[in-house]
Amino acid sequence: MVCNSGTSLVPVVGGKLHHFNYVGLYDGLAVMQDQETKTLWGHITGEALYGPLVGRRLTQTSNLLQMNVRQALTVDPNMQIAISDREYFAAGTHFGSAPGFGGGRGAERWAPNNPNAQLSPVFVETLGKEDTRRPRMDMGLGVWTGATRRYYPMELLRKRGDAFIDQIDSRNVLIYVEPETATPAAIFVTAKVATLDGLEVRLDNGTVVRMGVVLDRRGRQLPIERPQQIFTRWYGFALTFPQCEIAGS
């Protein structure tokens, strides 16, 4: 809710299933601990931070993308939809009844969609040396590969028309703001030019990105390859990947 940094990890170490709990904060980010060895793990990279399994890393097989129900069903018509009763705030209204993370009245001032969001003092106390090249609570798309760690500020995406082609590890990548959800995303492409047109992104190779899927000239859905990515606050990405690149600077 605060750093907006949800990720997807496989809970298997050395071929054995492990069970994880949230146990605290480090650098303002959640820290996990497995019940089997009591090792502490970072939740973005899946890296073991402290304990007997230091040097190990959990596998990341996909990205945890933000999407609404309509977009999810476009990606996969058979997708199951789970509705949580955790409390949350949207458009000034309180929903849900089960206690949420940092729940309670007033939690909306830390919500990710609040441009004036502030970091809770509890989180601030855990921060290490911050990277001040961007404001702490700045929002953007963080992308990383084996060789690259790059942050795309939302400010840059807006200036570039919400869709443009960049290069990551000598490969063309579409960086765009998904019109359906107003969240940024990255997709590897072969195109050289991208243009936002209403609810879709048109590429100069004839393909179209619509509702989170890539379609060919005949409207057939194509496979998608994405770099690891996360829509997050600057402080979380910068502390996870020190000295990361900042696109446009």
Image (tube, rainbow, N blue to C red):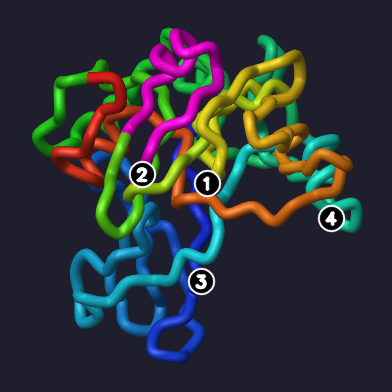
Residue at image mark 4: 79
Distance CA(mark 4)–CA(mark 1): 24 Å
Give the residue at mark 1: 188
Query: Amino acid type of disc 3?
Result: Val
Q: How many marks?
A: 4
Cα distance between the residues tagged 3 and 4: 20 Å
Residue 244 shows which numbered tag?
Answer: none
Mark 2 packing: few (<14 Cα in 10 Å), some, or many (20+)? Answer: some
Q: Is residue 82 left or right of residue 116?
A: right
Task: Name the front one of labels 2 and 4.
Answer: 2
Q: Position of residue 97 (x, y in %)?
A: 73, 35
Distance CA(mark 2)–CA(mark 4): 31 Å
The outermost residue toward the front is: 205
Please state the horizontal and vertical placement of residue 61, each as a whole percent of the image: 52, 65
What residue type is disc 1 on?
Phe
Badge 4: residue crowd in 10 Å (few <14, some 14–19, many ≥20): few
**Mark 3 surroundings: few (<14), some (14-19) or many (≥20) residues within 10 A:** some
Q: Secondary structure at mark 1?
A: strand
Q: Please check the rendered image and state whether residue 106 is part of the magenta-colored stretch, yes or no.
A: no
Alpha carbon of mark 1 to alpha carbon of mark 2: how far? 9 Å
- For the point 47% across and 34% down, the residue is 231
Placement of 151 over or under 138, stated as above or below: below
Magenta stretch, residue numbers: 151-168
* Residue 187 can be seen in this image: yes
Residue holding disc 3: 10
The reply to whether discs 1 and 3 touch (Cβ–Cβ < 8 Å) is no
**Marks 1 and 3, Cα distance to the nearest angstrom?**
23 Å
Q: Amino acid at mark 4?
A: Met
